[in-house]
Amino acid sequence: MVITEKLKAYGDVECNVSLAHHTTFRVGGNCKYFIYPKNELCLIRILQVLKEEQIAYKILGKGSNMLCSDDDYEGAVICLDRYFTDFSFTEDGECIVQAGCSIILLAHEAMKVSLSGLEFASGIPGTVGGAIFMNAGAYKSDMSQIIKEVFVCIDQQIVGMKPEELEYAYRHSIFQKHRDWIILGCRLQLEKGNQKDIRDIMDSRRKRRMETQPLNKPCAGSVFRNPEEHQAWKLIDEVGYRGKRFGGAMVSLKHSNFIVNEENASAKDIVALIEEIQQKVRDTFNVELITEVEKFNWKD
């Protein structure tokens, strides 16, 4: 049986799909198989088929923190944002949510039932799974502060992991060391609050983001993590790189920790600009800028 037909029994399958259409940077080559599993059991079966056929795979949500290379990917991309999107809230503020759910959507739905704790995530354009993976955060809050349990597929077995097992730190989790573990969802603990107060906080922060971030252009959010005792954007400003271009990639004039796809940039343009900034900051301040954006399908 053709591999595609095998996979179609367990999910929606597309072939030779441009990753540029599935990442917020709008760059990337084609991938051979793009798969949306229908549920957890189908996901496990898909993993078995890929293993039998010796096909590599990558888990993807909304591609909001991903820098794919311009090269084609001969493996499979497994995307969870079509079917793994359910969530529910309990009266005591607990939230059960699948990994493919939009974290922005979840924050707004929590606000509608007067639950506080996700206000920081109301502007993060990714999935819950991606937020768990990165320990995403903003405004001095992050995922580690609200997680009660994460459900993970490890060696085709579904297990629950407690917060103390997750090795959470600034933009870090244990999942970054175990790329074969697949985050399926989590339990969050939120708090009862005043709906108007929660909405006002989210509205205020949205207004601030619109004013200070280049949300009208393809980008992947903050490119660099903040080094200890420094802010990445200030270092970039101080080496004179606000507005700097390389090919079609440009350091945003609005926020210098954002690189935007200004004009049909290639992934190589973006990487070249990232590396140039890192070198300039290293030479000037002896500070290492570590990328927050995750590279995928690069040979180096």
Image (cartoon, rainbow, N blue to C red):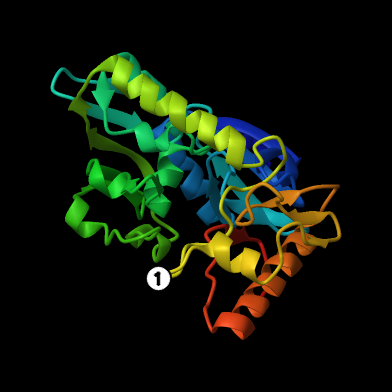
Residue 188 located left or right of residue 240? left
Q: Nearer the viewer, residue 70 or 155?
A: 70
Q: Secondary structure at mark 1?
A: loop
Seen in the picture, residue 8 relative to 183 is either above or below; the reply is above
Image quarter of residue 171: bottom left
Residue 294 located left or right of residue 272? left
- Which residue occupies 77% across, 52% down? 29
The residue singled out by tag 1 in the image is 228
For the C terminus, give its image quadrant. bottom right
Q: Nearer the viewer, residue 127 or 272?
A: 272
Seen in the picture, residue 61 relative to 198 is either above or below; the reply is below
For the N terminus, give its image quadrant. top right
Residue 78 located left or right of residue 173? right
Where residue 220 sits in the image (x, y, percent)? 61, 48
Is residue 85 visible in this depiction of the protein? Answer: no
Image quarter of residue 176: bottom left
Q: Nearer the viewer, residue 63 or 254?
A: 254
Is residue 59 visible in this depiction of the protein? Answer: yes
Count of marks overlaid on the render: 1
Where residue 94 sits in the image (x, y, percent)? 20, 28
**Three-letter code for the amino acid on which mark 1 is drawn:** Glu
- Which residue occupies 61% across, 76% down? 281
